[in-house]
Amino acid sequence: MIDPTIAIHHGRVVKRTGDGILVEFRSVVDAVRCAIEIQNGMAEQEQMMSDKQMRTQPHCRPRGTGRGRVAEKGRKRGGAGR
C-alpha cells in the first residue's frame, strides 16, 4: 500500500531504515497528499483488524513530514531537513 501510494504522488524512495522511510517528492503538496492518503489507508486497515490482531501484530502510522533536500555524502543519503 505504501509504495504504490508514493508512486502515485510522484515520490522517490531514497532510503529505508527499519521502520522508517525517506522519500523525496517534487512538491510539498505531493508529499502532504501522500502522507494523508497513507495515514487514512492505515487507519482503515486497523479498523478491519480484530482486537487480537491489534495486540499481536505490529502496526504503525506515519508520524510527520519534513522539508529540505536529500543530503548525499559518499554512498550515504539522509535528510537535510530544516
Image (cartoon, grey):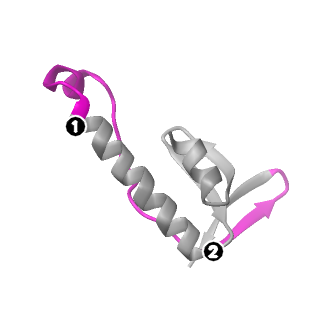
Residue 67 visible, this angle: no
Q: Residue at x 29, y 45 (%)?
A: 43
Q: Which mark is residue 38?
A: none
Q: Is residue 71 magenta?
A: yes
The amino acid at mark 1 is Gln
Q: Residue furthest right?
A: 74
In this orientation, which residue lies closer to the viewer: 49 or 79? 49
Q: How many marks?
A: 2
Q: Residue furthest bottom?
A: 82
Rendering coords of residue 3 (x, y %): 59, 43
Q: Which residue is mark 2?
A: 27
The amino acid at mark 2 is Ser
Q: Quadrant of residue 47?
A: top left
Q: Residue furthest left?
A: 51
Secondary element at tag 1 = helix
Residue 36 visible, this angle: yes
In this orientation, which residue lies closer to the viewer: 16 or 33? 33
Residue 13 against residue 24 in the figure, above or below: above
Q: Which mark is residue 47?
A: 1
Q: Residue furthest front?
A: 8
Q: Is residue 44 magenta?
A: no
Q: Is residue 63 left or right of residue 71?
A: left
Rendering coords of residue 26 (x, y %): 68, 70
Looking at the rendered image, the quarter that the C terminus falls into is bottom right
Q: Is residue 36 left or right of residue 54?
A: right
Query: What is the magenta range?
Result: 48-75
Q: Earlier in the sequence, mark 2 or mark 1?
A: 2
Q: Quadrant of residue 44?
A: top left
Rendering coords of residue 81 (x, y %): 58, 73
Rendering coords of residue 64 (x, y %): 42, 63
